[in-house]
Image (cartoon, rainbow, N blue to C red):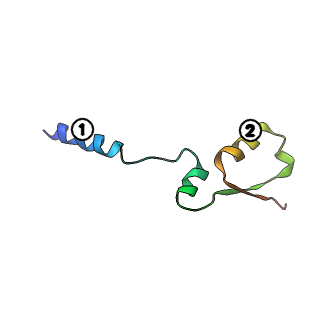
Amino acid sequence: MAGLLATAAVTALAGTAQAASTLGAAAAEKGRYFGAAVAANHLGEAPYVSTLNTEFNSVSRRTR
């Protein structure tokens, strides 16, 4: 009986929580921005740009 109740609870909870796919998306769900200070000298690096494009919904210029 306890195993059946535990299974039912997990099944019920599984459909109620939906995680955002990125940090920027998680922030946007709450009406917020998730940003990064961007170093212009790294914009030629594909992994750096990919991470910026995927995870952040706001960027600003890095000053140093």
Q: Which residue is mark 2?
A: 47
46 in relation to 36, above or below? above
**From mark 2 to mark 1, how far is it between C-alphas?**
41 Å
Marks 1 and 2: in contact by CB < 8 Å? Answer: no
* Residue at 56 percent of width and 62 percent of height: 31
Q: Amino acid at mark 2?
A: Pro
In terms of secondary structure, where does tag 2 sit? helix
| The C terminus lies in quadrant | bottom right
Judging depth in this view, the residue of 63 and 16 nearest the camera is 16
Q: Amino acid at mark 1?
A: Thr
In terms of secondary structure, where does tag 1 sit? helix
Q: Position of residue 49 (x, y in %)?
A: 76, 43
1 in relation to 24, above or below? above
Which residue is situated farthest in the right direction here? Answer: 41
In the rendered view, does 9 fall on the left or right side of 54?
left
In the rendered view, does 34 fall on the left or right side of 7?
right
Q: Residues within 10 Å of mark 2 (few under 14, many from 20)?
A: few
Q: Position of residue 44 (x, y in %)?
A: 84, 41
* Residue at 23 percent of width and 40 percent of height: 8
Q: Position of residue 33 (x, y in %)?
A: 63, 60
Q: Which residue is mark 1?
A: 7
Sequence-wise first label, 2 or 1: 1
* Residue at 66 percent of width and 53 percent of height: 57
Judging depth in this view, the residue of 57 and 36 nearest the camera is 57
